[in-house]
Amino acid sequence: MPHEETFWEWMDGHEEWPPFDRLLFLVYGPKIMGVLRALAELGVADELKDGPLTIAELADRTGAQEQPLFRLLRTAAALRVFRQGSDGRFGLTPEAEPLRSDLDSSLRDLVRFSGDPLLTAPYANLALSVRTGKPAFDQVYGASFYDHVEAVPEDAVLFDRTMTQRSWLTAVTLLRRVDLSRFSRIADLGGGQGHFLGEALTKHYQDATALLFERPTVLARAKPLLAEYGVTDRVSLEAGDFFSEVPVGYDAYILNAVLNGLDDEQSKQVLARVRDAIGTDTEARLFIFEKVMTESVNAWDYSKLLDMDMLVLFGGRERTLSDWRELTEAAGFELLTTPERGGSPWSALECRAR
């Protein structure tokens, strides 16, 4: 079988393709998402983890029809997600590996969520968010994102799985970038089910204790995970609302992917409550774990697409370093660190109370 250009090779060789075609390709983005979501739903990567298979074997294992499955995989192979060999069998590529469900680094549920109507329906109303500054999600579903997810079990399951994958991956990345060894009492505010604390207390800071501060419904789901990590005796659980009050008595406070889902006024309110909790403790620190968007004009940054997610889903936003500095200073903090870039979109911003 002769070698044909993959999509990425074709792109490299066509930097000057006409603007009409370039725009048309961007319009096709949802179609690519549809291909990836179908592959995730069918579990194709799981079936190929032990080696390439024929289309007949894959169809039998996934419960699909041979011809449509072949057409799906042919499209995916052109995108370098899966590969068809000279013998006609299909196998995994490095880009396809994260679609496996048995890997800690799996993105399968994230891919499924990204193509789910829970996300795509609000995106169809992005112009509404731009006109009003309000999340289109609320208009489409008649409730805020979190209220809807709590009320619809099937959406809650998919969202929880997605957040589980994201939380583990970001925890591993962030713990390489931040040193919390000088802190003995860590408060994770809005820390989800406790992935960050579980990873931190078991693999990095065996002498520290912690608080997980969350909504009651989330804390109920956190208990099994913390038990799995073996840290239930070191993590206190407290239900509360960080818009109203933040627990006192901790020397490190963490806001992990919390503020990007909030607008500036809401973010300032949360930061002010953390500042109140720190009080006069000059050694205490606030760590904000977020993406820091580039300030370079016209430059590509993954965070710019995520910024659209924040707009249509929550009315929040991703922020540049200047934005983060302005936000934290307005709440009585001094930003101490310059974010590390490269390798991950996540940064650890260390703040000291002024």
Image (spheres, rainbow, N blue to C red):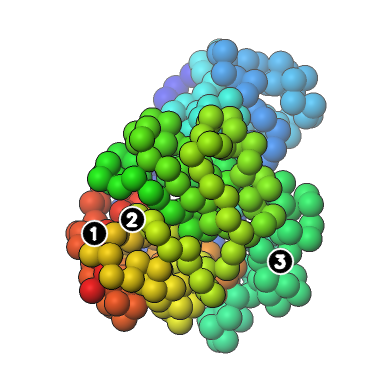
Depth check: give the residue in front, 97 or 246.
246
Label 3: few (<14), some (14–19) or many (≥20) C-alpha neighbours in 10 Å = few
In this rendering, position of residue 44 left or right of residue 79:
right
- The amino acid type found where label 3 is placed reads Asp
Q: Which mark is residue 71?
A: none
Marks 1 and 2, how far apart in space? 7 Å
Task: Identify the image quadrant of residue 4.
Answer: top left
Foreground mark, 1 or 3?
1
**Residue linked to disc 2:** 251
**Residue linked to disc 1:** 283
Among the two numbered marks 1 and 3 on one chain, the one whose residue lies closer to the N terminus: 3
The residue under the point 37% across, 32% down is 206
The residue under the point 33% across, 71% down is 279
Q: Quadrant of the C terminus?
A: bottom left
Marks 2 and 3, how far apart in space? 32 Å
Q: Which mark is residue 147?
A: 3
Q: Are marks 1 and 2 in contact (CB under 8 Å)?
A: yes
In this rendering, position of residue 313 left or right of residue 210:
right
- The amino acid type found where label 2 is placed reads Asp
Tell me if residue 291 can be seen. no
Label 1: few (<14), some (14–19) or many (≥20) C-alpha neighbours in 10 Å = few
Secondary element under disc 2, as helix, strand or loop, is: loop
Q: Disc count in the image?
A: 3
Depth check: give the residue in front, 236 or 125.
236
- The amino acid type found where label 1 is placed reads Glu
The residue under the point 56% across, 13% down is 51
Secondary element under disc 3, as helix, strand or loop, is: helix
Is the residue 130 above or below the residue 212 in the image? below
Marks 1 and 3, how far apart in space? 37 Å
Is the residue 48 above or below the residue 288 in the image? above
Q: Are marks 1 and 3 in contact (CB under 8 Å)?
A: no
